[in-house]
Amino acid sequence: MLKIMIAVDGSDVSIEAVRYGIKLLHSGLNAHFVIAHVQKEATLLELATTDSDLIANASIEAGMDLVASAQELLKAAGASYEVEISLGEEANTLIDIAESTECDQIIIGATGSGGLRSILIGSVSREVARHSRLPVTIVKMPEENEAADEENDAGGD
């Protein structure tokens, strides 16, 4: 059985990555998924003014809320999965999660569609792909959603 980490941040494209994992499962792949989410660590100012355990617990709770829709999709698909929530810098921490949970592959969403937008968006997925020793599949939004996003970016309705 393959063990596949899917990075989830609550965005539509990360949910699309979960759907891609489910599609693999339905095509006959025998897999167990690790749903991974990374919250940024508290700043020095936050740590100086608030109890660090309170901040960490709030971050973990927020992470659990952000992965809830991914869990619902996997449950509905009858998929085997576990959830890993960590604090840290996104790309390196995602790679650490994949390695510590002994995953065989990583699936991550990216939103860039070309040109300047592609350079500015998707840096976490690019960093994961660049630095991970594991195979990385980068999932983009379906083209019809991208076209609507581009129209909205241009001021269209």
Image (spheres, grey):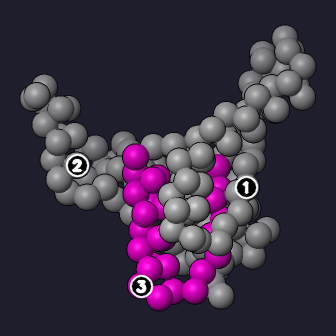
Badge 2 amino acid: Asn
Q: Which residues are magenta?
A: 12-37
Q: Residue at point 50% right, 58% down? A: 73
Based on the picture, tell me whether residue 8 belongs to the magenta stretch: no
What residue does disc 1 label? Answer: 84
Q: Residues within 10 Å of mark 3 (few under 14, many from 20)?
A: few
The image position of residue 54, as x and y in percent, is 85, 24
Q: Residues within 10 Å of mark 2 (few under 14, many from 20)?
A: few
The disc, 2 or 1, on the residue closer to the chain's N-terminal end is: 1
Badge 1 amino acid: Glu
Q: Is residue 33 left or right of residue 127?
A: right
What residue does disc 3 label? Answer: 27
Q: Secondary structure at mark 1?
A: strand
For marks 3 and 1, give the CA distance: 25 Å
The image position of residue 7, as x and y in percent, is 57, 57
What residue does disc 2 label? Answer: 145
Based on the picture, tell me whether residue 27 belongs to the magenta stretch: yes
